[in-house]
């Protein structure tokens, strides 16, 4: 946990191996494997939506590996294994926390809350000081205006964005005050405004709204979020293909940041390719990477330089699934979303933990809609950490 707090400021990609080490420690417990295998038994698959969610993600990971057979980009097999390991790792973390003894759960709770509060405070300091800590610790960033350091700090906020909400429930339990509990969330929000990734600001704001709504109508909020995810997944390429991206590039449609103009163009291109060229099986895992050179560059109004017409990924996870994994990938991922939502609806979860889970889903939705790639393992590790935080909250409230 201490390592993750450090990495949020000094090396966000290191969060993945840190989370992997935690999951590996949990995976040495025999009962995790026996319970996990039992989850996939025919009886559990018929009666427990959690089993269906697990099976759907295993199938999704397998399809990633299969799609590598026709992908022009190498390494697709390992991408499928990466997704599978991330899913299994998240499951191990949740199982460990949810089945912890009361004393152990309290220790997890204190560690998670302290990690999140420390990292959020450090990111706030970095934002207000112009990155003092990263400037003081080698190696030096020699890029103009230290933009790589600032971007890395923005990614650190991305790491913390979904974690501050389960941490708030845990801090509220320690202090009895919601005002104190949301200090890390406030710090992360202010830090987000100091860096270049506006999606972080929107994500934390969306998480806060979802948290409040879930405290009032928890089940309704969860159902609404599940429907939102499903609609976004199903409609992604059709909406993207209809974007008048050429008008944005030519400067006809208002004045928006160049990065958003580029995104609109990329989304439209991805939607068109997904529906025209990659149906029904998708063009293979990591296909977007192969387009980086062939797609060329575009001139976007407001940018002094030309920008890639297709970056390494389309900055929308749902579009990426349609483009690279086709209808089988969409079906498996959609089944996982629906089954996971059903499992949460059936579970006996306290109001605070369910509100935290809804907030995590809202933050994650913004991230996958505007930023994430399925192949960025550090982002998958963040989702696993958020699940751990919710499981810890569930465990300590269950044992009280």
Image (cartoon, rainbow, N blue to C red):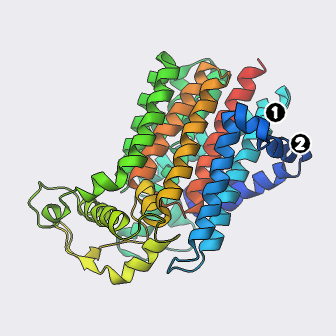
Q: Up-down: is 165 above or below 256?
A: above
Q: Are marks 1 and 2 in contact (CB under 8 Å)?
A: yes
Residue at the spot 50% in from the left edge and 44% down from the top edge:
161
Residue 75, position in %: x, y? 60, 77
| Label of residue 31 in the image | 2
State the image quarter where residue 108 is shown. Answer: top right
Residues 290 and 351: in front is: 290
Residues 50 and 363: in front is: 50
Placement of the C terminus among the 4 image quadrants:
top right
Residue at the spot 45% in from the left edge and 56% down from the top edge:
317
Q: SS class of the residue under badge 2?
A: helix
For label 2, count other residues whose C-alpha is less than 10 Å away and answer few (under 14), some (14-19) or many (20+).
few
Q: SS class of the residue under badge 1?
A: loop
Residue at the spot 76% in from the left edge and 33% down from the top edge:
98
Residue 294, position in %: x, y? 34, 83
Counting residues from the start of the chain, the first of labels 1 and 2 encountered is: 2
Residue labelled with disc 1: 99
| Label of residue 358 in the image | none
């Amino acid at each position: 946990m201490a390592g993750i707090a450090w990495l949020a400021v000094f090396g966000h990609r290191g969060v993945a191996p840190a989370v992997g080490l935690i999951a590996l420690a949990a995976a040495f417990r025999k009962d995790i494997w026996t319970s996990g295998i039992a989850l996939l038994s025919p009886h559990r698959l018929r009666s427990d939506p959690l089993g269906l969610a697990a099976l759907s993600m295993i199938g999704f990971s397998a399809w990633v590996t299969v799609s590598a057979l026709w992908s022009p980009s190498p390494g697709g097999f390992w991408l499928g294994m990466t997704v599978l390991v991330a899913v299994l790792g998240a499951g191990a973390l949740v199982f460990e926390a949810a089945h912890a003894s009361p004393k152990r759960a309290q220790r997890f709770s204190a560690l998670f809350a302290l990690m999140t509060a420390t990292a959020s405070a450090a990111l706030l300091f970095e934002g207000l000081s112009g990155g003092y800590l990263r400037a003081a610790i080698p190696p030096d960033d020699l890029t103009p205006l230290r933009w790589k350091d600032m971007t890395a700090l923005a990614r650190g906020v991305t790491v913390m964005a979904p974690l501050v909400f389960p941490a708030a429930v845990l801090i509220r339990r320690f202090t009895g005050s919601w005002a104190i509990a949301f200090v890390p969330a406030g710090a992360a929000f202010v830090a987000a405004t100091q860096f270049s990734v506006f999606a972080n600001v929107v994500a934390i704001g969306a998480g806060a709204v979802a948290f409040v709504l879930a405290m009032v109508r928890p089940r309704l909020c969860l159902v609404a979020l599940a429907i939102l995810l499903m609609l976004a997944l199903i409609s992604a390429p059709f909406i993207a293909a209809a974007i008048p991206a050429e008008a944005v590039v030519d400067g006809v449609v208002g004045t928006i940041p160049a990065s958003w103009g580029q995104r609109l163009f990329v989304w439209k291109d991805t939607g068109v390719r997904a529906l025209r060229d990659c149906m029904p099986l998708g063009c293979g895992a990591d296909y977007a990477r192969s387009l980086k050179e062939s797609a060329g560059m575009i001139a976007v109004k407001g940018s002094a330089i030309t920008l890639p017409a297709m970056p390494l990924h389309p900055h929308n996870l749902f579009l990426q699934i349609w483009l690279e994994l086709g209808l089988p990938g969409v079906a498996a991922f959609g089944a996982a979303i629906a089954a996971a939502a059903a499992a949460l609806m059936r579970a006996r979860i306290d109001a605070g933990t369910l509100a935290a889970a809804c907030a995590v889903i809202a933050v994650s939705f913004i991230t996958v809609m505007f930023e994430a790639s399925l192949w960025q393992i550090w982002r998958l590790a963040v989702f696993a950490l958020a699940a751990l935080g919710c499981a810890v909250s569930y465990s300590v409230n269950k044992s009280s």
